[in-house]
Amino acid sequence: METVDFSQPIRQSSKGIIIIFAFNAYKFFKRFFVIFIAFGVSLARKKTFATLSPQSITLIIIGILIVLLIVAVLKYLNFKFYLSKDDFHLSTGIINKDNTIIPKSKIQNVYIKQNFLQQIINVVSLNIETAGDNKSEISIKALDKPTALQLKKELFNKSNISEALHTAIETKNIFFKVSLKRLFLEGVSQNHLRSFAVIASFVFGLYYEFKDYFRSLKLKQHVEEIIHLDEESILNIIILNSVFILFAVLISLLFSVLKTVVTNFNLEVVETQKTIEINKGLFNKVSLSLTPSRIQNIVIKTNRIKRYFGLHTLSVKQAMVNVKQRKNFVIIALEKEQLKHLVDKLLTNYTSDLKALKPKWYYKRILVIDMLVLALIINVSGFFIFGNMMWFINIAFIIFSILYVQITYRKSYYKIDDEFITIGSGFIDTTTNILEIHKIQAVKLKQTIFQKRRQISSVIITTASKAVKIPYVSEADAKSICDYLLFKVESQDRDWM
Amino acid sequence: MFINQQIETDTLPKISSVELKPISKNYFKIIILNKAFVYAVFLSILIAGKFAIKKEAFQDNFVYIVTIVVVGLILNFVLARLAFKKRKYAIRDKDVIYSKGLIVNSITTVPISRIQHIEESRSWLARKLNLATLKIFTAGESGSDLKIDGLPLEEAKQINDFLSTRVNGNS
């Protein structure tokens, strides 16, 4: 492997011009998307737009592209970075020159990413993240891969301890690699309600944007012609509805599977001595590393179908991570043993064989009240929309409510030992939340006036990335949990990060 | 060597045995003024409605509407008064405790070692009444930050000093 000298100011790979150009063009077209649509529509109708002929419009577009290209070249020429002993230096800007210096010790995370275009021309982008707000992130858009890896390594090399660490980190071990089949299963067994909601909002958004266009298509009349709604027989309505539901389910299923496969394609978990690396993605390749000391919460999710296939999802919540990256720290389709191994690696000495403590019965009452409120909303709004027809829905709703209350109560528990808190919850999903006691930021006792009479209270535990709740235990228990956790946090002099 | 002593939960320092200190009574004046302003806006909207809306149904039931609104406001005020008594705080050697809320009561405890920074702020009214607000920020979710309103200025300064030295001393 040829080595690059980072101590002299260097530019990124010359392919960077293409990336910058494409990126700017994409941003430009995205911003003026609506105008372009208007262009297209009026061009198709009248062959002109605002007294401009098609020729001059193409000229304008070419002109814009040339300007964007020049900007890209200038940006590329002015983008220089180098490493000194302790700092990373970066100078950017065509007219306004920016000079950024980041001390190596303040770097929190280095990601290597590769989107679709970058895959074609074979470069990667390297993002450097520091603690603080989102804007402090630095992104080098085009580096060839060996250079990026070398830079990443040098960024993590603190000047004085470089040699000792070098040999230790080399032992890499690809611990887990997902197969396409398991990805597919994972996609099928997802919570389709959520994908349905995403699709529905997307379709409504589109419909709203192109309302007039759809109206001119007279879609409604077409549908009515196909199904002969004018006969108004109940059978037709049922068929129409079931076809629609089937269609929606199918689309959601397809969407879930596609989304899972695309975002997690070639998911790979690499174990090194200290950290765990995740590589994944089809169009957008990401590579991230997890440092155990920065982990705040660990959430394990599975559901009945997934458990049958042996699929577990592990998401890791880290402190000081930019919002966009947060959802990437998820490893899906893990076997039970693999999950256990990873949890052991991330949390030393974690055991789950403790006696699970249950919330009080009062929790069921709260769940019932939730359901009653929901029933009221459904019934009132249903009555006004559909009239007396809809009372039957309550039969299904009552069954659903009973299941909801029973299952949610059954799945909720908490375990506390010397170092960890484990909280279980979920209705369709089975969720397990694990956090280390010394990472607690604050503890809160919460009690409503009604709970006070029954001596019931909840404990809310906050870490740097998430707040979890031990619901509805007896007041005495809640207080002793609180006392115990505070004692633990305050008596040990351990840092939370 | 690793020692793992058993912990008797009964002997741990207890939150329930801490004597929480109520915040300054003067702060209630600020609450009254704030509330009065909101109430005035409500009532003036009602009165404006009396002249602007010409509908029969509204004009006939105007007295009832006013009564409902006034009863609501009085209830709101009484609740605020009762809830005010619940605003209490305590500083322990290792943590800060703040309790508030009548209908939903919460007691939040933040260990001093987890405090990121402290802010002391004083509104115009608070300056007149010699009060201060102490905000204590942690690295946690926004829900875990403490905001103690209506501390006497002297006390706020003392607490601020104490906590600041503690926070800086630890790191």
Image (spheres, rainbow, N blue to C red):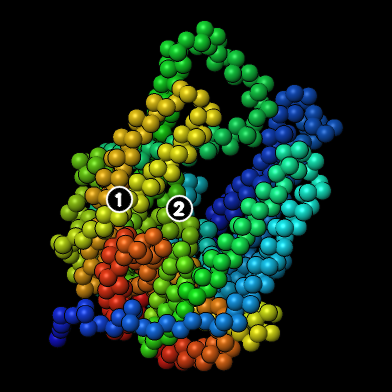
The chain letter under disc 1 is A
Is A112 left, or right, of A457 in this rendering? right
Q: Nearer the viewer, residue A320 or A71?
A: A320
Query: Which quadrant holds residue A238?
Result: top left
Query: Which quadrant holds residue B1?
Result: bottom left
On screen, A37 above or below A104? above
Q: Nearer the viewer, residue A119 or B129?
A: B129
Image spot of residue A478 (x, y percent): 30, 69
Q: Given the image, on which type of amino acid does mark 2 rest?
A: Gln
Please state, as top left, top right, bottom left or bottom right, where the N terminus of chain A lies in the image.
bottom left
Image spot of residue A311 (x, y percent): 24, 46
Residue located farthest toward the right when viewing the structure as drawn: A51
Is A159 left, or right, of A475 in this rendering? right
Q: Are marks 2 and 1 on the same chain?
A: yes
Which residue is painted at 68% across and 27% down in the image? A212
Is A51 left, or right, of A455 in this rendering? right
The chain letter under disc 2 is A
> What residue is disc 1 on?
A364
Q: Given the image, on which type of amino acid does mark 1 rest?
A: Lys
Residue B17 in view, yes or no:
yes
Please state, as top left, top right, bottom left or bottom right, where the C terminus of chain A lies in the image.
bottom left
Which residue is painted at 65% across and 85% down in the image? B129
Mark 1 neighbour class, 10 Å CA radius: few under 14, some 14 to 19, many 20 or more? some
Q: Secondary structure at mark 2?
A: strand
Q: CA distance from mark 2 to mark 1?
A: 48 Å
Say which label, 2 or 1, has the lower sequence index.
2
Q: Secondary structure at mark 1?
A: helix
Residue A7 in view, yes or no:
no
> What residue is disc 2 on?
A114
On screen, A81 above or below A249? below
Is A421 left, or right, of B47 in this rendering? left
